[in-house]
Image (cartoon, coloured by chain):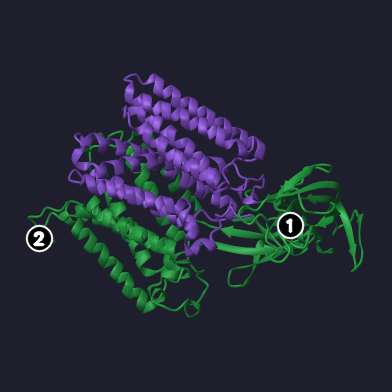
Amino acid sequence: MTWSSFIYFAFGAVLLWSFGAILAYKNRNKAMPSMFTAAGLMLFFIFISGLWISLERPPLRTMGETRLWYSFFLPVAGLLTYLRWNYRWILSFTTLLSSVFIIINIASPDIHNKVLMPALQSPWFAPHVIIYMFSYAIVGAATLVAIYYLARENKIVCKAHIMNMTDNMVYAGVACITLGMLMGAIWAKDAWGHYWSWDPKETWAAATWLGYLIYIHYRLKRNSSNRISMIILVVAFILLQICWYGLNYLPPAKQSIHTYSSQ
Amino acid sequence: MKNSSRNIWEQPWGYTEGFILTAGILLTGFFLQLAVGNIEISLFAAPVNYITGALFITGIILLHLLSGKSRVTRWLSGIYAAIPAVSALLLLCIILGLLPQLPKEIAGNELPPGIFKPLGWYQMTTSWPFILLCFYLLMILGLAILKRTRRKQSLRDIGFYLNHIGLFVALLGGILGSADMERLIMSVNEGQVEWRATDRQGTIKELTIAIQLDSFIIEEYEPKLVIIDNETGIVLPLSRPESYMFEGAGKTALLAGATIEIIEYLPHAAIFRDSAFLNVVPMMMEGAAIAMKIRVDKAGLPCPVEGWVSNGSYLFPPNQLQIDEHTSVAMPLQEVKKYRSHVTVYTEAGHTQKIVIEVNKPLSIGDWTIYQYSYDDSKGKYSDTPIFELVRDPWLKVVYSGIFMLIAGAIFIFIAGPEKSIL
């Protein structure tokens, strides 16, 4: 399977996710929305697997390939949140955000080839990137909730309910961010000789991690403000975006050994 | 938030005092930085780092035992002190991520001029404000752990201890251990034995192990074909450069509007060329190049163009095939798939070991870990001189025990989720 067939799979998946999202609003029963979302995920994953096989390496090397996983994990995070806490609107949020990343991938596709640099040939490669993409999706969903909250704070009746939801998501997300970071450290020791070198990617990963730690600790105080909590979440997500791809536009990017997209 | 009926420094302290104290730490660091410049890490080499670590931990324990119940110490072990400190560290991390960082070997007068230089921001991780802040944060972390032990323990505390002790151990071990870490570079020629390595300053050190290079092997990916602009040499089409990876002779590829048919493929070829003629023949010898005979057709060409392309080697120059006055077919250098060294390692104790060292597969022997770092690429894929990096980090076990506690703590948090009591 090559990149040219992505548009068909992506279109089919978005269509199924959208049905799922609409049904979530209409149905009290969770079965139908979940089935549609799961079917979309299955379709999307068939494409990822096909690409994996045809490239003869995990499709996790380039920015576009990480976006591919992100588009996949967002509805996963949405579905888990929906099933676990029964927020009916979350599926439409995650479908929307996932579509944005799919559109970016269709509009500016990467160059896909079989080349995998020696440094990436490691059993740590797939778990390190996949767990990071999964955590990005969860905290991405939490950020959507935070923006929703900040935009309509006065109209929200049950604020504690929403705060509880972002807490749950951030705890799961930060757990995965921590795991991704530490797997990266252990891998870096094997590949580059040191577990932490303050490479720009590592520095921004640390900044992102600290941002979420501030949220978690701030929320532990009973008198914490909901508004400030949500603002911290948005700021932490901006740090995450810099870590993911934004740092490519910053001066230290030239020094980074974390660059694998270039021809 | 802070209770508004209370003045600053009036108990109970809140975030305001936390931010003021953190600012004080940064300011102290700032003045020390101006006065003496970056911290010379080598001054903390063993045993100084062991003593520093022991004194620091003893200090925290004493503070906890002697005044653990005082309001200031309790505040210092809590969130009101922690969040300002973490925020300041985040701020320094952002500066660190925005400014290019220069190796610590670069002396002060070689740094770029301007305001960031006296602040130590080009070598942030050895600057006074950064290190002082780390120790302040470690103190808060240590006190928080000790304070928690006084509470009634529950199952949830496992997550707290794993995460906080793990971070304390990994961070303190990493900072103190950095002074004892040694990183050396060694290059060895095929068939030779080497026991000397150089550090970052270029000083040669003799080791207690010797490495004999039995063979060095580089594997490359299949060659690629691209179409380039004759004038600029840039790969076309400009908006999204295309390339075709060789899949076998007889195949046809469509590249930037041209059809390329591969007529003949020589994995080992000699290329002889003068101004008028080009001769490509098979050559089974070191230094041979890859060559492909191709036929190119494109709309607007009177007839297809045929000829050889090659990316050359250290013996032969590369060869391109001109399609028309604007474009040519070229073969870029192949990407490296794998490189590995077959070595025999000798230790002083008389122990001999034959092993393969590869990227991502270092060899640990005694105190040293030997990495396949790179190779001398002046002979391309025929290089016979790998470069190894030798790393010695006596504190690695300490840092790893912290990291593994943190991993367990993260898994705990993933399963247990947030504390419900805050609602």
Check whether the beta carbons of the residues at disc 2 and disc 1 lie within 8 A of each other: no
* B1 relative to B56 in the view: left or right: left
Q: Colour of chain B?
A: green
Judging depth in this view, the residue of B233 and B89 nearest the camera is B233
State the residue lying farthest toward the bottom. Answer: B109
Chain drawn in purple: A
Percent coordinates x, y for residue B158 in the rendering: 34, 38
* B341 relative to B115 in the view: left or right: right
> Can residue B42 be seen?
yes
The residue tagged with tag 1: helix, strand or loop?
loop
Residue ID for mark 1: B333
Q: Are marks 2 and 1 on the same chain?
A: yes
Q: Chain of mark 2?
A: B
Cα distance in 3D space between marks 2 and 1: 70 Å
Q: Quadrant of the image for the C terminus of chain A?
A: bottom right
The residue tagged with tag 2: helix, strand or loop?
loop
Residue ID for mark 2: B7
Mark nearer the N terminus (2 vs 1): 2
* B242 relative to B328 in the view: left or right: left
